[in-house]
Structure formats: C-alpha cells, structure tokens
Amino acid sequence: MMIIAWLLGMLLAVKFFAGWEEKKANPNQAPQSSYGTNYVEVILDSGRGGHYTASGLINGHKVNFMVDTGATSVALSERLANQLNVKKLIPIDLSTANGVVRGWATKLDTVTLGAIELHNVSATITPNMDDDVLLGMSFLRPLDFAHRNNQLILRQYKSNQ
C-alpha cells in the first residue's frame, strides 16, 4: 500500500512540474483579450529567455506561436502544414541562419491570437523547422504593437479587420 501511495505521489509531482514547465515555456496558453471602443487588444507575457510564445489557431487548428518581428511572414513547418492541409502554392528560396533552403509561399485562411483574427495571411512553409509557428510581420504589420514591462501589447483596430 505504501508503494502505491508513493508512486501516486510521484505521478502527481511529475504532472505538476510538467505543467509548471509548460507554463514557463508558454505563459500565454489562453491569451486574454480586452475590447475598446474601436479595437481589440491582446497582451502577451514574455516567457523563457524573453521570447513571446502563445497558443492560437491557424485555420481553426490549435498551434503554438513564437512572435518574430524579424520574420517577413508567418512561417510553419512542412510537417505542420501537411497536418493542417495548408497548400504549397509557389516554390521559393528561403534565407535562414543555416543557409538557403527551398520552401513554399502560401496563404492561410485565418490566423487567430486571442480575439485578434486576420484573414488571407501570407505565410511560408519551411522544411526542417520545429512545430512552433513563427508569427512574423505578415500577421503583425496590420496591428499596432508595443513592448512594455515584459509584455507585448497587440492591438487590432476595427478598420484593420
């Protein structure tokens, strides 16, 4: 009986610390939105290493985003694109930190972060990338955004929808 109690305690500890670790890696698993007269705003807390990660949706499917203001467009892995049935439209060469690779330009029907939703978003499908989606400027450009106190404030005005 003592062994079962000990094993149960260990299982609960592992589950607790796994959730705690995931929260540190992605403190924005359910991004909160607030509304003004003519805008919607999402505030993201910085995670490990000062990066902004958040859970969101691409074409209605849950994904993990990493905000990257240095990325021209939203970028997703070839594996994730296949899972989400995202079509490879135009072959392109992509300059990465590891050199030039062949990728594909595409369009995403919807990209959603909290209550911010954009339609027909330009994206690239990149081979050999992990499954975090880089949330680049093709998503961020129509938004106002600012960094303050380890938070990223994203604001979408009604005229930008």
Image: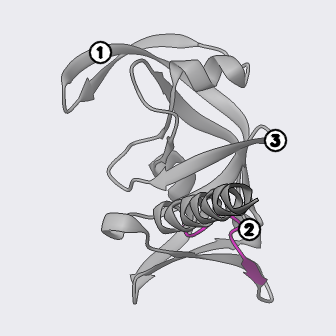
Query: Residue 31 location in percent, x, y?
Result: 68, 69
Q: Quadrant of residue 37?
A: bottom right
- Kind of residue at disc 1: Val
Q: Quickly name the residue at label 2.
A: 159
Left or right: residue 98 compared with residue 138: left
Mark number, residue 101 = 1
For discs 1 and 2, the disc positioned in front in the rendered view: 1
Highlighted range, magenta: 27-34
For discs 3 and 2, the disc positioned in front in the rendered view: 3
Instruction: Compare marks 1 and 2 and give the one earlier in the sequence.
Output: 1
Instruction: Look at the image and say whether residue 33 sits in the magenta stretch.
Output: yes
- Kind of residue at disc 2: Ser
Residue at 59% across / 13% down in the picture? 89
Left or right: residue 142 compared with residue 71: right
Q: CA distance from mark 1 to mark 3?
A: 28 Å
Mark number, residue 60 = 3
Above or below, comparing residue 30 to residue 76 in the picture: below
Instruction: Look at the image and say whether residue 16 sits in the magenta stretch.
Output: no
Above or below, comparing residue 51 to residue 103 in the picture: below
- Kind of residue at disc 3: Gly
Judging from the image, what secondary structure is the residue with disc 3 in?
A: loop
Q: Is residue 152 visible?
A: yes
Residue at 34% across / 70% down in the picture? 50
